[in-house]
Image (tube, grey):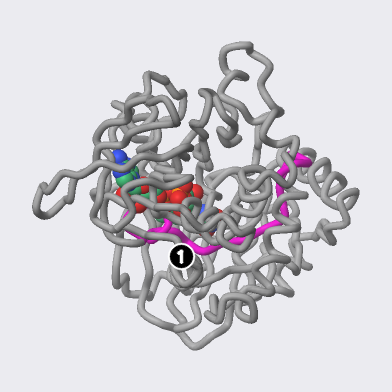
C-alpha cells in the first residue's frame, strides 16, 4: 500500500474512477482512490443509466455529445461491455410553455450538431405505440441518446486504472485532511475494523458526490450542494418493446426498458432537506409513480414491482457542477445532480488532461465554487432529472 502519492481521489464512484482511469492513461499512475464503502455504494451504483445529449445549456449538450462518443468506444478500449443502447430519449411536453422551451432547446441542440427533432403526439406514438398521449402537446426526440448498464463502467475503469498502477482502496474513508508543506496529509480509517492509517498526497480531488460538502469541510470549505433523495424501481421483465427512454417534462417521470426486459422508472418526490444523505424507500413514491406511469402507459397497471430503491442526487443551486481548484492542490468534482453518470467519461478525461499538465479546459474556470459567492452563476440547466 502506498503511503505517499501524487494524487489522492476521495470517492470511488464513477467520477473518481473515470478520473483515475484517464489519469493512468495520461501516464499519471501514482494515484490512490479512497472509497469509504464498496464499489458503486453511492449514486453510481443506484442510477437509471440514462445518457442523453438533450440539454438546455450549450456546455452540457457539447459535453454529452463527446461523452456518448467516448461510451461508444468503451468496450474496445476497456474490454467491458456497458450495454450502450442508443434507442433515443423521448421527452413529452404537456403545456404550451413547455413546448416553447422545448423548441428553444431543440434549436440549441441542432446548432451543436445534435439531431434532435420536434415531434407531434402522433409521431411520438409511432415510436412508442403504448403511450396514452391525452394532454401531450408535443415531444422532442434524439435517436442518439440511450441507456447503459452502469456497474460495468465502474468495474472497467477500476480494473484498467489498477492494471496501470493506480491503487483503489475500498472500505477506506477519509476522516481528516491537514495541509502540509508539500500537499496534504489524509487520515483514513477502515469501515469494518476501524483500523487507522495516513496517506500523504501532493494533490487531492474531492469526488465524494453527495458527501462532498462533508469532505470539503475537512479543509474548511463550505459547498452549496445538497443531497436530495431520488427514488427508482424496477418491475418484472416484459418482452422487449420499448426502445427509447421516455420522460415527462412536467413531473420528471422517466422510464426505460432494461436489457432483461424490466421497466426501470423513477420520479422525484419532495424531501426534508437537513443536508444529510437519506437512502430509505417510501410508500409515497410508489403511489406517485404508479399514478403518473399508468396514466401515460395504461398497460403498466398490470405490472408487478420487483425492487424499489433510492440514491442521492447531488444538487447545486444552478443545476451545474462544481469543479476547479478552490485551494492550492485541492480540487472539486461534484454537484452533478441526476446526470453525473453520463458526464463522467468526458469530465474524467478533461480533468486528467488538466492534472497531467496537458491543457486546462475552460469548464474549470466557469463551474467554480467562486460563482456562488460572486453571484456570476452559469445559465441554469433546465432539463434535470
Ligand atoms: C436513482 C438515481 C437515478 C439516476 N439516474 C441517472 C441517469 O439516468 N443518468 C445519469 O447520468 N445519472 C443518473 N443519476 C446520477 C448519477 O448516478 C450521479 O450523478 C453519479 O453517479 C455521481 O457520481 P459520483 O462519483 O460523483 O458520486 P457517487 O457515486 O455518489 O460516489 C461518491 C463516493 O464517495 C464515497 N465517499 C463519501 N465520503 C467519503 C469519504 N469521506 N471517504 C471516502 N469515500 C467517501 C461514497 O461512499 C461514494 O461511493 C441518478 C442518480 C440516482 C440516485
Percent position of residue 230, x then y: 39, 47
Q: Is residue 289 visible in this depiction of the protein?
A: yes
Q: Give the residue drawn at x 67%, y 34%.
A: 364
Q: Is residue 216 above or below residue 157?
A: above
Q: Is residue 101 above or below residue 80?
A: above
Q: Is residue 245 above or below residue 213?
A: below
Image check: 129 left or right of 14?
Answer: right
The reply to whether the residue tagged 1 has its Cβ within 8 angstroms of ligand 1 is: no
Magenta span has 48?
yes
Q: Is residue 268 visible in this depiction of the protein?
A: no
* Observer-nearest of 131 and 374: 374
Magenta span has 261?
no
Image check: 59 left or right of 24?
Answer: right
Quadrant of the rendered structure where residue 289 is? bottom left
Q: Give the residue drawn at x 68%, y 59%.
A: 67
Quadrant of the rendered structure where residue 322 is? top right
Percent position of residue 38, x then y: 28, 60
Majority secondary structure in the magenta region: loop
Point out the residue furthest to the front here: 181
Q: Which residue is mark 1?
A: 165
- Magenta stretch: give its range: 40-60
Point out the residue furthest to the left here: 193
- Work out which quarter of the rendered image holds the N terminus and state it: bottom left
Percent position of residue 78, x then y: 57, 76
Q: Give the residue drawn at x 52%, y 34%.
A: 331
Number of numbered discs on residues: 1
Amino acid at each position: 500500500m502506498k503511503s505517499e502519492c501524487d494524487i489522492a481521489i476521495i470517492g470511488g464512484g464513477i467520477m473518481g474512477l473515470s478520473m483515475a482511469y484517464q489519469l493512468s492513461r495520461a501516464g499519471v499512475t501514482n494515484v490512490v482512490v479512497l472509497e469509504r464503502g464498496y464499489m458503486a455504494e453511492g449514486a453510481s451504483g443506484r442510477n437509471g443509466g440514462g445518457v442523453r445529449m438533450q440539454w438546455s445549456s450549450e456546455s452540457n449538450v457539447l459535453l454529452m455529445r463527446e461523452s456518448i462518443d467516448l461510451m461508444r468506444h468503451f468496450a474496445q478500449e476497456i474490454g467491458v461491455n456497458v450495454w450502450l443502447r442508443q434507442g433515443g430519449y423521448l421527452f413529452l411536453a404537456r403545456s404550451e410553455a413547455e413546448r416553447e422551451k422545448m423548441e428553444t432547446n431543440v434549436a440549441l441542440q441542432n446548432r451543436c450538431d445534435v439531431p434532435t427533432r420536434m415531434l407531434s403526439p402522433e409521431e411520438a406514438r409511432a415510436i412508442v405505440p403504448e403511450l396514452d398521449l391525452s394532454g401531450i402537446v408535443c415531444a422532442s426526440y434524439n435517436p442518439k441518446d440511450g441507456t447503459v448498464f452502469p456497474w460495468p463502467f465502474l468495474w472497467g475503469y477500476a480494473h484498467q486504472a489498477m492494471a496501470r498502477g493506480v491503487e483503489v482502496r475500498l472500505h477506506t474513508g477519509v476522516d481528516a485532511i491537514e495541509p502540509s508543506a508539500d500537499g496534504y496529509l489524509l487520515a483514513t480509517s477502515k469501515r469494518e475494523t476501524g483500523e487507522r492509517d495516513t496517506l500523504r498526497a501532493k494533490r487531492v480531488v474531492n469526488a465524494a458526490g453527495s458527501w462532498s460538502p462533508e469532505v470539503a469541510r475537512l479543509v474548511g470549505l463550505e459547498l452549496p450542494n445538497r443531497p436530495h433523495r431520488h427514488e427508482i424501481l424496477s418491475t418484472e421483465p416484459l418482452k422487449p418493446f420499448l426502445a427509447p427512454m421516455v420522460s415527462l417534462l412536467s413531473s420528471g417521470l422517466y422510464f426505460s426498458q432494461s436489457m432483461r426486459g424490466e421497466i426501470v422508472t423513477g420520479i422525484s418526490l419532495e424531501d426534508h432537506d437537513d443536508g444529510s444523505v437519506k437512502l430509505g424507500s417510501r410508500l409515497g413514491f410508489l403511489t406517485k409513480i404508479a399514478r403518473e406511469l399508468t396514466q401515460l402507459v395504461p398497460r403498466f397497471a398490470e405490472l408487478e414491482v420487483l425492487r424499489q430503491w433510492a440514491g442521492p442526487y447531488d444538487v447545486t443551486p444552478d443545476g451545474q457542477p462544481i469543479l476547479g481548484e478552490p485551494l492550492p492542490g485541492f480540487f472539486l468534482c461534484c454537484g452533478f445532480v441526476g446526470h453525473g453518470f453520463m458526464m463522467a467519461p468526458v469530465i474524467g478525461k478533461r480533468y486528467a488532461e488538466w492534472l497531467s499538465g496537458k491543457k486546462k479546459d475552460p469548464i474549470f474556470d466557469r463551474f467554480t465554487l467562486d460563482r456562488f459567492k460572486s453571484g456570476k452563476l452559469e445559465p441554469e440547466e433546465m432539463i434535470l432529472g
